Amino acid sequence: MSTTSLQYSPTITEDTLNLIASSLSQQGHIILKDALPTDLIDELLTTAINYEAQFKRAGIGRENQHQLNRVVRTDQIRWIDATNPIEAAYLCEMEGLRVAMNKRLFMGLFDYEANFAHYPSGAFYKKHLDAFKGETNRILTTVFYLNEQWGDTDGGDLVIYDLADQTLLQVKPEAGTLVVFLSDEFPHEVKKTFRDRYSIAGWFRVNNSSVNRADPPL
Ligand SMILES: O=C(O)CCC(=O)C(=O)O
Ligand SMILES: [Fe+2]
């Protein structure tokens, strides 16, 4: 089936979903190679490149901290547009993952937000956590890579640490690789890249009203 079809259905198998669930519950992270169909990867990469003009400098925290932001990260992002069939196909895959993790791990994941990211040569993202315990509705991070034939000297590795700052994993941003980890447990960084590096970063979230708010309100 064409990935541009409106009838797109998720392709991740039950076996793989079981593997993801058991790995998340035991280690809190998983790296999957060749996670999605190659024609979808190609179309996502083409989409990212074609919409280059819409990418904006990525920020962290408040806008008035932009100087600081440039020290922390130098990538450019564009939020996923669900009206584009290619991007909708990616969201459909992630929706399958969301439902499967809720069913297997009772995670209560409510929705998903995601952006394309472009790291031009020289770009990086210093070590950070995507979420802080009790302060966020981001629960589970996903990163999906779109880069064909990533070489050993191309840089741009994702390095994942534990909360004691020990290196756990080093991941090449190779097309088809999907990384999933608990957002508040794994500091991570993107090493300086030496060629254009394209990815989709996303976060499964719990319902906002269940975080940071008294229930019922006082
Ligand atoms: O692209 C990556 O490997 C990770 C990106 C990341 O950490 C983020 O966008 O929060
Ligand atoms: Fe991150």
Image (tube, grey):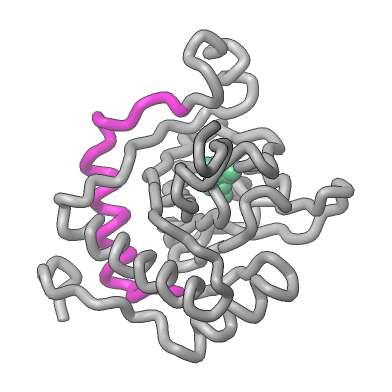
How many numbered dots are placed on residues in this image?
A: 0
Magenta residues, start to end: 34-58
Is 42 in the magenta? yes
* Res. 148 image quadrant: bottom left
Relative to 174, say whether 214 is above or below.
above
Q: Is residue 120 left or right of residue 154?
A: left
Residue 41 at what x, y percent from top left? 33, 64
Q: Is residue 180 left or right of residue 45?
A: right
Residue displayed at 56% across by 31% down = 122
| Ligand 2 positioned in quadrant | top right
Residue 105 at what x, y percent from top left? 58, 75
**Residue located farthest toward the left when viewing the structure as drawn:** 6
Residue displayed at 67% across by 40% down = 132
Q: Is residue 105 left or right of residue 203?
A: right
**Residue located farthest toward the bottom when viewing the structure as drawn:** 15
Identify which residue, 117 or 96, lies in the foreground.
96
Is 143 in the magenta? no
